[in-house]
Image (cartoon, rainbow, N blue to C red):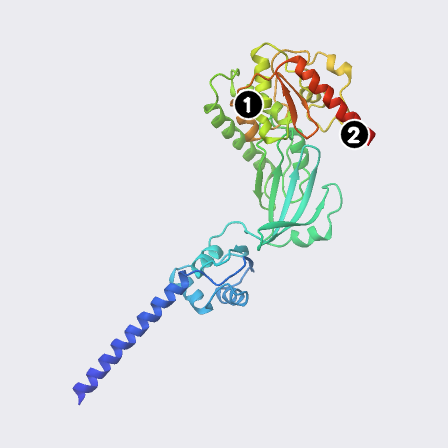
């Protein structure tokens, strides 16, 4: 009898182990399997939260199939104590394993509220934006000038720990404009007392944290521009007529200020390169304007004939070759265009009324393009 009892007990133990193994295997498969979420969501994890609360929130939003498997998976992977506070984008059909990785990885929040301080060529502004997780596009909540009182929408999100911050620099902004605007950023610290060399600040979008030092941001911009320029110089067309990367940067800044149409940059660069190679003057208005303003704001009017005739280091209607320094901070596309311009015979260009330019090889053809542009200007003035 005892032998039968022992045999039955052993059989039951084996069955139990098989069942347990099956359950564990099923749980593992559920943990790594595609999740039930039909539309991406923004998951907010509060400071001091835990995996129980997170699993309940995910279950309520239909993002996981089993809160208990979610928690056990976090325990088994050794991540149960690594939960990070913030707002995190959970993609549709994300597995429980992927979600655990998202909320324990750390770093900046990936969705929710974003404050962007935009520095353009004409002005700077704050933007408060909210990410729509379903479309992964931002909805503008508020925008305002740094010199006016901040609206309630900004004040509301300013103290939230999961609010993200960025400083976005537009291509073509001058170093003075960037420094002037950065010294007005409310969420940064320190003060920039010296304007960096023109052209040496990389236009880009920079992730920031409240209290970050302005000088550190300037250092990041300079390091990035130096890296970009060095890489482009190494990959340059060997026939470009520059003696140094600094000269290429001057040309890139002129290209940046002459066109906002991306596909035209190579053509515009080719015009100026062709002029340099033929000993012609560059004759470009943006350099003359920089000589007047020194990059400190916008001229706000047309150039006078006296200014076009004045002999200054930046008046390319009078001087030969390049001006002594860049006239703005060019983006990577303009740097690449300056160092690898299109191969053309163009020597002239003028606005064509579409936002782009009409290019010409001869002065006669250029004069016809200018005449057409004057007609367009006259028609617009009479509308």
- 199 to 324, vertically: above or below: below
Density class for disc 2 (Cα within 10 Å; few <14, some 14-19, many ≥20) is few
User: Where does label 1 land, which residue?
Assistant: 338
Whether 42 is drawn above or below 197: the answer is below
How many marks the image carries: the answer is: 2
Q: Position of residue 337 (x, y in %)?
A: 54, 25
Image quadrant containing the N terminus? bottom left
Using the rendered view, name the quadrant where residue 319 is placed: top right
Is residue 69 found left or right of 291 in the rendered image? Answer: left
Q: Is residue 146 above or below residue 197?
A: below
Circle 1 packing at 10 Å, graded few (<14), some (14-19), many (20+), is many
Q: Residue at x 54, y 35 (%)?
A: 220
Q: Residue furthest bottom?
A: 1
Query: Picture coordinates of residue 182 (x, y %)?
Result: 65, 37
Residue visible at 63% across and 39% down in the picture: 190
- Residue 82 visible here: no
Instruction: Please give the label number shown on residue 380.
Output: 2
Please identify the quarter of the rendering in which residue 381 is found.
top right
Q: Which mark is residue 3?
A: none
Q: Quadrant of the C terminus?
A: top right
**341 and 362: which is toward the camera:** 362
């Amino acid at each position: 009898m005892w032998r039968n009892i022992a045999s039955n007990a052993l059989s039951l133990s084996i069955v139990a182990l098989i069942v347990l193994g099956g359950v564990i295997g099923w749980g593992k498969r559920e943990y790594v399997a595609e999740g039930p979420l039909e539309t991406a969501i923004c998951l907010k994890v509060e400071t001091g939260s835990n995996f129980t609360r997170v699993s309940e929130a995910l279950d309520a939003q239909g993002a996981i199939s089993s809160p208990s498997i979610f928690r056990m998976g976090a325990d088994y992977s050794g991540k149960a104590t690594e939960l990070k506070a913030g707002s995190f984008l959970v993609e549709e059909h994300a597995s429980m394993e992927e979600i655990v990785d998202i909320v324990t990885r750390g770093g900046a929040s990936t969705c929710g509220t974003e404050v962007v301080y935009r520095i353009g060529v004409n002005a700077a502004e704050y933007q408060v934006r909210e990410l729509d997780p379903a479309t992964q596009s931002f909805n503008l909540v508020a925008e305002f000038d740094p010199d006016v009182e901040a609206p309630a929408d900004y004040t509301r999100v300013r103290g939230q720990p999961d609010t993200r911050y960025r400083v976005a620099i537009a291509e073509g902004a001058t170093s003075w404009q960037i420094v002037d605007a950065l010294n007005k950023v409310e969420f940064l610290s320190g003060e920039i007392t010296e304007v960096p060399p023109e052209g040496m600040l990389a236009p880009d979008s920079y992730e920031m944290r409240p209290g970050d030092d302005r000088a550190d941001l300037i250092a990041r911009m300079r390091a990035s521009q130096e890296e970009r320029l060095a890489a482009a110089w190494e990959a340059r067309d060997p026939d470009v007529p520059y003696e140094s990367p600094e000269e290429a940067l001057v040309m890139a800044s002129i290209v940046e200020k002459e066109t906002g149409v991306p596909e035209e940059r190579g053509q515009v660069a080719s015009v100026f390169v062709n002029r340099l190679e033929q000993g012609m003057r560059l004759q470009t208005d943006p350099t003359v304007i920089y000589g007047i303003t020194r990059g400190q704001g916008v001229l706000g009017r047309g150039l006078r004939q006296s200014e076009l005739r004045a002999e200054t280091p930046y008046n390319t209607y009078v001087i030969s070759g390049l001006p002594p320094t860049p006239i703005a901070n060019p983006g990577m596309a303009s740097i690449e265009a300056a160092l690898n311009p299109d191969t053309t015979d163009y020597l002239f260009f003028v606005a064509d009324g579409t936002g782009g330019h009409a290019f010409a090889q001869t002065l006669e053809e250029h004069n016809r393009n200018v005449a057409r542009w004057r007609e367009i200007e006259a028609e617009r003035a009479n509308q």
